[in-house]
Image (tube, rainbow, N blue to C red):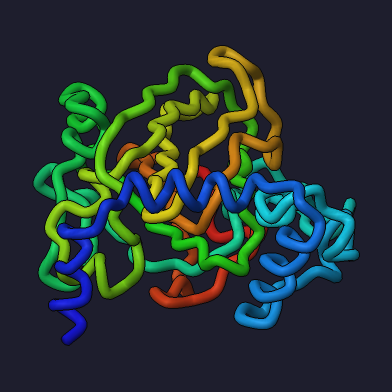
Amino acid sequence: MSALLARLQYLLPKRLLSRLMQALAGSRTGWWKNLMIGTFCRLYPVALGEAERPDAHSYDSFGDFFTRALAPGARSFPGDPALLGWPCDGRLENFGAIQAGELIQAKGQSYRVAEFLGGNEAAAGALEGGWFATLYLAPHNYHRVHTPATCRLKDRCDIGGELFSVSRTSSRFIPRLFARNERCVMELQHERCTLHLVMVGALLVSGIEIAPETGSALRAGDELGRFNYGSTVVLLFPPGCIAADADLREGAEIRLGEAWGRWV
């Protein structure tokens, strides 16, 4: 049944549904936006106490609420520059070595690094033998993405594509899911290496917004961008530059800024 439900997405008018969601989420009509926000808060465990504006009715629209900012001090990055912090809240879906030019999507499913990066064979080759992590943002999570370390936004590539759901079920049954969906590939130049952070769009995502201009110098924790609905972030590091903590576990909940590894 799970496989059937996942594959039914091939028949859905995914882009039309996403545009409809964008229109509904952008409405500033008071009763409507309050209805959407209230219903969402009843369905999902939203931590409004961590938000810059904890009053759910203070937001101009559901979209404004969904991309809400955190209160000052709600998250912090490691003070030690040798440590790496997670770039977002969410769940650690997969992590491990980049082997044979492929990344793990789910059990029995993988996809090519070069395809994922928009056909960039040179970047894929430089990442061979490196390390990756796939981070899933659930609907109730904080939906802004930040830099994991002090770096420069070296380059950015927006890639068009599908808008499949990125749920665990979809990851198991839709081949090459992350390499098929819309995404924004960012090359981040750290003093030790070039890493990639990829924001992957999904069903009902009405857009990925990027904050800095290409070439911008960024401190650890600076905002990179935001999702207008739940989705996925993939981190990719070349070999020999980072060491992940030994106690990382797939399926673990993660928090923005929480230390998970170090530069080597």
The answer to whether residue 106 of the structure is visible from this angle is yes
Query: What is the x, y in percent for residue 44?
Result: 62, 78
Q: Compared to 223, does 245 lie above or below?
A: below
Locate residue 49 relative to residue 64 in the image: left or right.
right
Quarter of the picture holding the N terminus: bottom left
Q: Compared to 141, does 83 lie above or below?
A: above
Label total for image: 0
> Where on the picture, by quarter, is residue 185?
top left
Extreme residue toward the bottom, this view: 1
Q: Compared to 13, does 195 lie above or below?
A: above
Q: Considering depth in this image, is 20 or 51 the residue closer to the camera?
A: 20
Query: What is the x, y in percent for residue 10?
Result: 16, 58
Q: Which residue is located at x 49 percent, y 64 percent?
A: 245
Q: Which residue is located at x 34 percent, y 51 percent?
A: 132
Q: Which residue is located at x 59 percent, y 45 percent?
A: 145
Query: What is the x, y in percent for residue 207?
Result: 49, 39
Q: Considering depth in this image, is 235 or 118 the residue closer to the camera?
A: 118
Q: Considering depth in this image, is 18 or 163 the residue closer to the camera?
A: 18
The answer to whether residue 77 of the structure is visible from this angle is no
> Where on the picture, by quarter, is residue 213?
top right
Locate residue 92 relative to residue 106 in the image: left or right.
right
Query: What is the x, y in percent for residue 2?
Result: 20, 82
Q: Which residue is located at x 43 percent, y 26 percent?
A: 187
Locate residue 134 relative to residue 191 in the image: left or right.
left
